[in-house]
Image: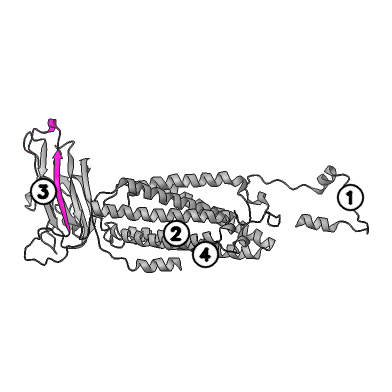
Amino acid sequence: MCGVSVLALLLLLSLSAEASVHDYRGEKFAAKGNAFVVHGGSEGIYASAPNLTDAYPPANPDSFIRLERITFRRNKEFSNFSSWPIQAVLFEVEDRETIGGSAYGGQRAVCCTGDLAKLGVCAEGQVIYRPSVENPDWPQVFGVSFEIDDEVAVLPLKSIQITKTGMYNLYFIHCDTRLKELVVEGKTVWKNPSGYLPGRMAPMKIFYQFMSFAYVLLGIFWFSQYARFWREVFPLQNCITLVITLGMFEMALWYFDYAEFSESGIRPTGTTIWAVTFGTVKRTVARLVILMVSMGYGVVRPSLGGLTSKVVMLGGTFFLASEVLELVENVGAVSDLSGKAKLFLVLPAAVLDVFFILWIFTSLSATLNKLQARRMMVKLDIYRKFTNALAAAVIVSVGWICYELYFKSNDVYNEQWRNAWIIPAFWQVLSYSLLCIICILWAPSQSATRYAYRDDGSEEFDRDETTLTLIKPSPISSKDVRSVVPDARPVQSSNGNSNDDLEEDKRE
């Protein structure tokens, strides 16, 4: 029910967008083909609201990209010549084929070569581009050149109104091989109708607002039950309380992170780090709780015994791998790119997740078998429901991973940026739904102690079977038993019968 309610709320998400501020602090040009390039930013921007006045362009357009104090610097030793222009090229992703060209069907080039200049299609040393079919004013290209002995060249202030919704890309490009150690400084402001949050990220602000509300509702249910039946609370329920609390803080911090970003246009580093850290701690604790439940902790066994150190080590390793990955993905991220984490950061977290899943289902299988053998039907029923929920979550996760790979492989240029928010949002909804199921199964109640471990000897598990052993001890033969206990004989009772009851008790 919790997952369904959240999905229903997600259908109401408004897709109003916002944008951001990009700072350039000594960015160096990198060689790309026959050009030298600095990526200035990529963002999804919605078109300006209709202009109700006669003035065009309006004095304060809703959606725009503004180039402010864009400065190019070169070293003094390379300032003894006049350069070809350094150009800012701004285009919508659907017009990407209008940038660059080739002579006689040869290799495509960004910079105009001597052969193309002879054909009269471009000026040598400048970026090749042709007007868009839909909008002849695009792409937008602005340039500035160095004069002799100049060390600084400043691009004039430009503000471009956005009249078409799309994914916009900005590149600073030059074609002069003599411009060595050239850097760019300044900033660009990208704005949508409602603020400074990038268009790809804008729906996430509303999503986290709804998720914060969903966690508050779950918290009200859980904490009210916890307060009513606090005398019947057992350790597992304390762990669930911690996960709910961490989830509430995580959702609130992510919302404030995006809200502050939307207001100022600058990603708040401190808030982002706290949001990432709370989220990583929550995911780690949640996985450890599921693993401990699968092992029967607090329900059919009082402790994890010798496995405690292994569980803690796995949790600590997962936390470090996930924290580094999330920090790289989120801290300072302002462009609408689909992710910048390298494979060597993604792989450890993925491998540890797989290890968690294998260990969880292996432990669940052992716990279910023992519950069935001991005929603990109440606990067996709840564990079967828990197993079914986990299996469904894993199947859905695998399916979603396949869809995510398909989505990203077919969206190389981020043309589906308006739907990209669904990818991360799904994982939050799935995690929340699984937490709701666990809360329903193990909610504090007057009869909750039926599901807790009772230290009366009736539920003692054979701990050796749940420990990860490398060498299995060999069975002792009957001959060895006789040699160890030579005088063992049946004990007769006063009525002549052996003590079968004692032997049965031992078997129990």
Relative image position of residue 399 (x, y in whole percent): 43, 62
The residue located at (48%, 44%) in the rendering is 317
Q: Earlier in the sequence, mark 4 or mark 2?
A: 2
* Secondary structure beneath label 1: loop
Q: Is residue 80 magenta?
A: yes
- Tell me whether the residue at label 4 lies in contact with that at label 2, contact meaning CB atoms closer than 8 angstroms: no
- Residue under the image location 66 percent in, 44 percent down: 471
Q: Where is residue 119 drawn, in percent x and y? A: 7, 52
Label 2 belongs to which residue? 431
**Closer to us: 157 or 366:** 157
Amino acid type of the residue that numbered disc 1 sits on in the rendered structure: Arg
Q: CA distance from mark 2 to mark 3?
A: 47 Å
Residue extending farthest top:
77
- Magenta stretch: give its range: 60-82
The label on residue 157 is: 3
Q: Which disc number belongs to residue 440?
A: 4
Q: Residue at x 69, y 61 (%)?
A: 374
Residue type, numbered disc 2: Ser
**In front: label 4 or label 3:** 4
Sequence-first tag of 2 and 3 = 3
Mark sitting on residue 489: 1
Q: Earlier in the sequence, mark 4 or mark 3?
A: 3
Amino acid carrying mark 3 in the image? Leu
Separation of marks 1 and 4 at Cα, in angstroms: 54 Å
Count of numbered tags: 4
* Relative horizontal placement of residue 346, taking residue 442 as reference (left or right): left
Q: Secondary structure at mark 4?
A: helix
First in residue order: circle 1 vs circle 3: 3
- Placement of the C terminus among the 4 image quadrants: bottom right
User: In 3D space, how far apart are the residues under numbered discs 4 and 3 (Cα atoms)?
Assistant: 59 Å
Q: Could you say whether the residue bearing mark 3 is in a helix, strand or loop?
A: loop
